[in-house]
Image (cartoon, rainbow, N blue to C red):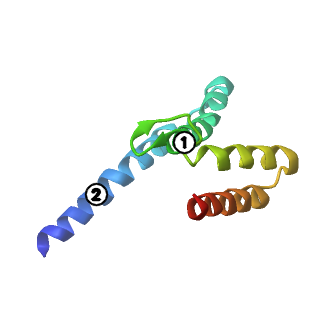
Amino acid sequence: MGNYYGLIIGMAVVTYFPRFLPMLLLSKKEISPSFSKWMSYIPVSIFASLVASDVFFWENDFNLYPAVNLKLIPTLLVLVVAMKTRSLLWSMLTGIVSMTVLWYVL
């Protein structure tokens, strides 16, 4: 049981320090506007890569055929709803309902 506590504490330290050290070291320094602008794209790019890897891969294979990859049709519907309504709620509901219907119908 003692090894588990050491493991948990070790994971907490390894997770905490990469976040804390840059804040500590950079808190007194001025960050350039170009670097700040570049950093603003990181969350968007990470989210896009997570979504793309989930949408375009079906059963561990890259697949662009809607007859095989059932996630492509709801993705297109969500994109259309998101562009028309600009509502996160309606986009999410569209994705959930369309994926559920496709999953149980096909």
Q: Quadrant of the N terminus?
A: bottom left
The one of 48 and 38 positioned closer to us in this rendering = 48
Q: Residue furthest top?
A: 34
Quarter occupied by residue 98: bottom right
Residue for badge 1:
27
Identify which amino acid the numbered label 1 is placed on.
Ser
Q: Residue at x 66, y 23 (%)?
A: 34
Identify which amino acid the numbered label 2 is placed on.
Met
Please state if 70 lies on the left or on the right of 61 as rendered. Answer: right
Q: Quadrant of the C terminus?
A: bottom right
Secondary structure of the residue carrying numbered label 2: helix
Q: Residue at x 46, y 40 (%)?
A: 22
The one of 50 and 106 positioned closer to us in this rendering = 106
Residue for badge 2:
11
**Marks 2 and 1, how far apart at CA:** 25 Å
The one of 19 and 104 positioned closer to us in this rendering = 104
Work out whether mark 2 precedes mark 1 in sequence or the reverse, and give the earlier one: 2
Mark toward the viewer: 2 or 1: 2
Secondary structure of the residue carrying numbered label 1: loop
Number of other residues with Cα within 10 Å of mark 2, as a class: few under 14, some 14 to 19, many 20 or more? few
